[in-house]
């Protein structure tokens, strides 16, 4: 007579039931789940409070060098694209589960608890104090930061070129001149005299430039705007 085949799953289940009863099993599973929830709550608390930790302890053998950035590199990106680099406690966007998972995996790999998080994102994603592509960083010390996670959509490819005009006062003057020139070219021929000449065009351009500059300066002062190089790490709304 042939012996019946062995059901491994049934054997495993039988062995489990022999070693501990159902109440013990449920308790152990619940304890693991509770530890996971507690760990996740601790991560969220660290992100929302964002202590003044300046470095985390990493296992350098486990680090991915392509995720290590110096503060100067981060500043350059923020200035070019008019982004902010601020403590995570100012971030008002919703942190995706993938970011939490990335932190948990990184903490497990390096056997440490991360803190002092910072985020690179547009101003509209921060809860700023009055006076399309977030990046989550953890400080490593000596002005170096480790990229923990990236989420959301990539930035519009034209953003860098549009924000170039707001990098400095000189760049803003170029924008003012281009707008003035465009408006000058839109003035109909013979509007101010029967015959157009270069002198009249220069005068019109001069008055257009003054008018556009006045509007831009008024808007800038009224809204409290500032240049990219001044706001990249500012926590204030009017910047």
Image (cartoon, helix red, strand yellow):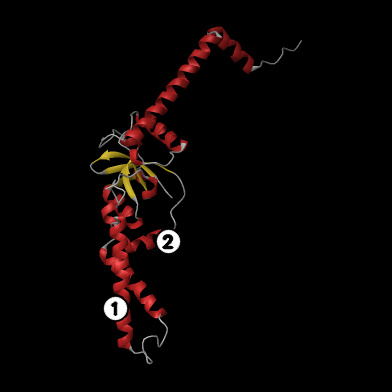
Q: Is residue 171 above or below residue 196?
A: above
Which residue does the numbered mark 2 point to in the structure image? 158
In the rendered image, the residue lying farthest to the front is 192
Residue shown at 38% from the left, 62% from the top: 162
Residue 31 drawn at (x, y percent): 46, 17
Q: Residues within 10 Å of mark 1 (few under 14, many from 20)?
A: some
Residue 206's disc is: 1
Q: Residues within 10 Å of mark 2 (few under 14, many from 20)?
A: few
Residue placed most toward the observer, 22 or 68: 22
Question: Which callout, 2 or 1, points at the residue further toward the start of the chain?
Answer: 2
| Quarter of the figure with the N terminus | top right
Residue 214's disc is: none
Res 47 → quadrant: top left
Residue 119 drawn at (x, y percent): 35, 43
Residue 30 drawn at (x, y percent): 49, 17
Q: Nearer the viewer, mark 2 or mark 1?
A: 1
Residue shown at 31% from the left, 50% from the top: 74
Res 180 → quadrant: bottom left
Measured in 3D between alpha carbons, the distance from the residue under mark 2 to the one under mark 1, in whole angstroms, is: 29 Å
Identify the element where label 2 is drawn: loop
Residue placed most toward the observer, 200 or 153: 200
Residue shown at 33% from the left, 57% from the top: 80
């Amino acid at each position: 007579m042939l012996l019946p085949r062995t059901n491994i799953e049934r054997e495993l289940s039988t062995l489990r039931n022999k070693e501990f009863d159902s109440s013990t099993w449920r308790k152990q599973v619940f304890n693991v789940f509770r530890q996971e929830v507690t760990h996740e709550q601790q991560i969220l608390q660290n992100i929302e409070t964002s202590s003044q930790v300046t470095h985390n302890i990493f296992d350098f053998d486990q680090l991915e060098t392509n995720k290590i950035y110096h503060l100067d590199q981060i500043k350059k990106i923020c200035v070019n694209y008019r982004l902010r680099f601020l403590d995570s406690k100012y971030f008002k966007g919703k942190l995706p589960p993938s970011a939490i998972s990335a932190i948990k995996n990184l903490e497990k790999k390096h056997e440490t608890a991360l803190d002092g998080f910072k985020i690179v994102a547009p101003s509209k994603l921060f809860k700023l104090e009055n006076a399309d592509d977030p990046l989550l960083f953890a400080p490593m010390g000596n002005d170096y930061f480790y990229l923990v996670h990236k989420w959301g959509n990539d930035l519009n490819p034209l953003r860098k070129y549009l924000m170039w005009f707001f990098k400095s006062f000189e760049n803003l003057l170029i924008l003012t001149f281009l707008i003035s020139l465009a408006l000058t070219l839109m003035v109909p021929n013979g509007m101010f005299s029967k015959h157009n000449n270069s002198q009249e065009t220069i005068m019109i351009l001069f008055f257009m430039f003054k008018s556009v500059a006045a509007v831009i300066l008024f808007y800038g002062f009224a809204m409290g705007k500032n240049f990219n190089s001044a706001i990249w790490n500012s926590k204030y709304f009017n910047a």
